[in-house]
C-alpha cells in the first residue's frame, strides 16, 4: 500500500527531501536552545562579564533565527510536496478509472469513486504532510530533549520514566477506541454522497412525485449516522488534552518541588536554577512531542482506511487490455458473432447472452427489438468491446475485437444511448466531442442529418448556445438529436443507436433514418428500438428474447414466421386489437 502511494510523489521528491532536512535542522536547534538558555541563566547568576553574556545572547538570537528559517522553509516545501502528491494521486486515480472496462466500474459505485477522489485523498494528503513534517520533527525533538534533559537534570530527569509511559499508554488507548468509529464514517460517506447524487440527478422525478420530504429524511438519516460516529470518535479523542495536561502539570510540580529541594539542600552544587529552567522547557518539549506523535497515530489510523480505498482503485486491473501486437485499422463495418455467450460476472449463475450466432454485412441497416431485459443493449456493447465475451468471439471487419487496439476499435464505432449525456459548454463544443477537427460545414451537415439544425438555429446564439451540465436546458428529443449528430461526426464504420430516438416523434425518426440511407450508405447501422416503425425498413431485423436470438429476417419474413414479432406489430399498429376489428372501425 505504501509502495503504491509513494509512486505518486514523483516530481515532488526534492520538496519532500528538503522538508525532512530542514525540519530535522529545526528540531536539533530547538533542542539546543534550552541548553544555551540554562547556561546563560547560570552565567548571569554567577555575575560573569557582560561580553560573555552578550556572546551567549547572540548565539541564542542566531539559533532562533536559524530555527525560524528552517521552520519556514520546511513549511513551504511541505505544502508544495503534499499538495503535489495529492494532485498526482488524484490524477492517477482519474486516469486509472478512464482505463477501466465497464466490468471494473461495476465494482465501484459512482458515489464511492467521488468520495475516494475527494475526502479520502484529502485525508491521505494530510497524513503525508504530517509524516514528512511532524513525524520527523516530533521523534527527533523527543530524543534530543530526553538526552539533553538527562545531561542537564541528572536524577531529576527520572520524572520522565513515570510521565512518558503514562502518557503513551493513555494516548494509545484513546486512539484504539476512537479508530473503529472513524473507519465506519468513511463507508457512510459513500451512502451520503449517493443520496446527494441521486437526488440532484433525479430532481425532476423527485418533484414530480412530491418526494422532497422523503429525500430530506433519507439525507438526514445518513447525515445523522455520520454525526453520531464522528461525535463518538471526537469525544474519545478529546481525552487527549486532559491526559496531556495531567502529565504537564505533574512534570512541572515534580521538577519545581524536587528540583528546588535539591538546589537548596546542595546549595546549587547538584542542580541550579538554570538547570531547573531547562528541565521545565525540556519537559514541555518532551510531552508536546508525545502529543504530536499521538496526533500522527490518530491521523494515520484514520487515513489508513482512506489509503486502502484509494489503493483498491489504483491496483484494480482493467479487464480489457490491448494485445501485444494490436491491429491498428478497421477495414469495414462487417460484424460476426460466433458461438457467443456472455455474463457480467464470473460469479453470475445465468448468462445474459446465450449461443449467439449472427452475421451482419458491412453497410447494412439492422434493427433489434425485444422485450425489456432481453439483453439488446448487452448484445451491441460487445462490438466496441465495452465488455469481453465469456465464450465465443465477436469479429469486426473480419478481425476479433480482442485483437484490435482498443482506441482504434472504439474510434470506428459510434454509440448513441437513450440516456446519452451532453456536457457543460456550447453546442459547438459538445458536437466536437465526435471530431474536434470538424469544420463548420461538417457540423451543420451532421445536425441536418440528425434533424437538429432547425431547432439549434432557433436559439438566439445558434451553435454557440450554452448547454448546462447534463443538457438540462434542452428537451429529451433535442438532446438525443444532438447526440446523434455528435456520433455522426466520428464518421464511424459502425453506428449503434440504442433506443436513441425514443424521445422524438415518428416523423422525425423517419427523416433521420432516411438521412442515414442517403448520407452514410457504407456505415453499418444498428438500431435498437421499441417501435417497429423505427426498424421496419431495415435490411435485417433481430428479435431477441431472454438473452437469445428468437428470429432474424426482414419485416415481411418476420410477420410470417415470428409470432412474437407479429403480436408486437399488431399491438402497435392496431392498438392491441386484431386487424379485422381495426378495419371495421
Image (cartoon, grey):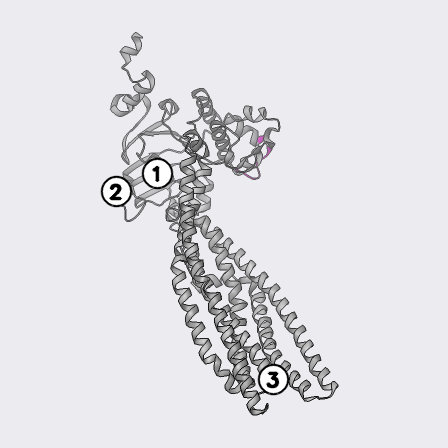
Residue assigned mark 1: 378
Q: Seen in the image, is 404 located left or right of residue 467?
A: left
Quarter of the image with the C terminus in it: top left
Residue assigned mark 3: 273
Closer to the N terminus: mark 3 or mark 2?
3
Please name whichever residue, 189 or 41, is drawn nearer the observer in this view of the structure. 41
User: How far apart in space, not on screen, are marks 1 and 3 (Cα)?
Assistant: 84 Å
Q: Seen in the image, is 146 located left or right of residue 556?
A: right
| Helix, strand or loop: magenta stretch | loop
Q: Is 476 rendered above or below residue 92? A: above
Please name whichever residue, 227 or 70, is drawn nearer the observer in this view of the structure. 227
Tell me whether the residue at label 3 lies in contact with that at label 2, contact meaning CB atoms closer than 8 angstroms: no
Residue assigned mark 2: 350
| Rendered residue at 56%/78% (across/down) | 280
- How packed mark 2 is, by other alpha carbons closer than 10 Å (few <14, some 14-19, many 20 or more), is few
The image quarter containing residue 460 is top right
- Please state the extent of the stretch shown in magenta in the rendering: 434-441
Give how far across and how far down residue 531 sits, in percent.
36, 24
Closer to the N terminus: mark 1 or mark 3?
3
Q: Seen in the image, is 94 located left or right of residue 573?
A: right
Give how far across and how far down residue 211 sits, in percent.
41, 33
Does residue 164 appear anywhere in the picture?
yes
Give how far across and how far down residue 472 sits, in percent.
51, 33
Does residue 95 appear anywhere in the picture?
no
Closer to the N terminus: mark 2 or mark 1?
2
| Rendered residue at 51%/66% (across/down) | 131
Please name whichever residue, 155 or 525, is drawn nearer the observer in this view of the structure. 155
Amino acid at each position: 500500500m505504501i509502495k503504491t502511494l509513494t509512486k505518486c510523489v514523483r516530481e515532488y521528491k526534492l520538496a519532500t527531501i528538503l522538508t525532512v532536512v530542514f525540519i530535522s535542522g529545526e528540531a536539533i536547534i530547538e533542542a539546543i536552545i534550552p541548553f544555551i538558555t540554562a547556561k546563560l541563566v547560570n552565567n548571569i547568576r554567577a555575575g560573569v562579564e557582560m561580553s560573555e553574556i552578550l556572546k551567549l545572547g547572540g548565539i541564542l538570537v542566531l539559533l532562533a533565527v536559524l530555527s525560524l528559517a528552517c521552520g519556514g522553509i520546511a513549511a513551504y516545501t511541505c505544502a508544495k510536496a503534499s499538495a503535489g502528491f495529492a494532485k498526482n494521486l488524484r490524477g492517477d486515480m482519474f486516469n486509472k478509472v478512464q482505463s477501466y472496462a465497464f466490468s471494473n466500474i461495476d465494482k465501484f459505485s459512482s458515489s464511492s469513486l467521488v468520495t475516494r477522489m475527494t475526502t479520502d485523498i484529502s485525508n491521505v494528503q494530510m497524513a503525508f504532510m504530517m509524516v514528512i513534517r511532524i513525524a520527523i520533527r516530533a521523534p527527533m525533538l523527543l530524543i534530543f530533549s530526553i538526552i539533553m534533559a538527562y545531561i542537564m537534570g541528572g536524577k531529576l530527569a527520572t520524572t520522565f520514566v513515570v510521565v512518558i509511559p503514562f502518557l503513551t499508554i493513555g494516548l494509545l488507548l484513546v486512539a484504539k477506541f476512537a479508530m473503529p468509529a472513524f473507519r465506519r464514517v468513511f463507508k457512510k460517506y459513500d451512502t451520503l454522497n449517493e443520496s446527494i447524487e441521486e437526488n440532484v440527478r433525479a430532481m425532476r422525478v423527485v418533484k414530480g412525485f412530491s418526494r422532497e420530504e422523503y429525500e430530506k429524511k433519507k439525507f438526514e438519516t445518513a447525515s445523522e449516522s455520520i454525526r453520531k460516529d464522528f461525535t463518538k470518535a471526537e469525544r474519545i479523542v478529546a481525552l487527549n488534552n486532559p491526559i496531556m495536561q495531567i502529565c504537564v502539570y505533574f512534570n512541572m510540580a515534580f521538577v519545581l518541588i524536587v528540583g528546588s529541594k535539591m538546589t537548596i539542600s546542595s546549595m546549587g552544587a547538584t542542580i541550579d536554577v538554570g538547570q531547573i529552567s531547562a528541565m521545565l522547557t525540556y519537559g514541555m518539549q518532551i510531552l508536546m512531542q508525545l502529543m504530536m506523535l499521538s496526533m500522527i497515530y490518530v491521523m494515520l489510523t484514520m487515513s489508513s482506511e482512506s489509503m486502502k480505498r484509494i489503493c483498491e482503485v489504483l491496483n484494480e486491473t482493467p479487464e480489457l487490455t490491448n494485445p501485444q501486437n494490436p491491429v491498428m485499422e478497421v477495414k469495414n463495418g462487417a460484424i460476426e458473432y460466433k458461438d457467443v455467450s456472455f455474463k457480467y460476472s464470473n460469479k453470475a449463475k445465468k448468462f445474459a447472452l446465450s449461443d449467439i450466432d449472427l452475421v451482419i454485412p458491412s453497410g447494412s441497416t439492422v434493427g433489434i427489438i425485444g422485450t425489456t431485459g432481453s439483453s439488446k443493449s448487452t448484445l451491441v456493447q460487445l462490438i466496441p468491446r465495452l465488455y469481453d465475451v465469456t465464450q465465443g468471439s465477436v469479429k469486426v471487419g473480419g478481425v476479433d475485437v480482442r485483437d484490435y487496439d482498443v482506441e482504434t476499435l472504439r474510434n470506428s464505432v459510434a454509440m448513441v444511448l437513450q440516456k446519452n449525456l451532453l456536457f457543460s459548454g456550447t453546442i459547438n463544443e459538445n458536437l466536437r466531442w465526435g471530431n474536434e477537427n470538424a469544420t463548420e460545414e461538417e457540423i451543420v451537415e451532421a445536425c441536418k442529418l440528425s434533424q437538429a439544425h432547425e431547432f439549434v438555429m432557433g436559439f438566439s446564439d445558434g451553435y454557440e448556445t450554452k448547454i448546462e451540465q447534463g443538457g438540462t436546458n434542452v428537451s429529451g428529443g433535442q438532446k438525443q438529436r444532438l447526440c446523434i449528430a455528435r456520433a455522426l461526426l466520428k464518421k464511424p464504420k459502425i453506428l449503434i443507436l440504442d433506443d436513441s430516438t425514443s424521445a422524438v416523434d415518428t416523423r422525425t425518426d423517419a427523416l433521420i433514418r432516411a438521412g442515414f440511407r442517403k448520407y452514410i450508405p457504407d456505415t453499418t447501422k444498428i438500431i435498437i428500438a421499441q417501435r417497429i416503425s423505427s426498424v421496419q425498413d431495415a435490411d435485417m431485423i433481430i428479435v431477441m428474447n431472454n438473452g437469445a436470438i428468437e428470429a432474424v429476417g426482414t419485416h415481411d419474413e418476420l410477420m410470417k414466421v415470428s409470432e412474437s414479432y407479429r403480436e408486437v406489430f399488431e399491438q402497435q399498429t392496431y392498438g392491441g386489437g386484431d386487424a379485422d376489428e381495426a378495419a371495421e372501425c
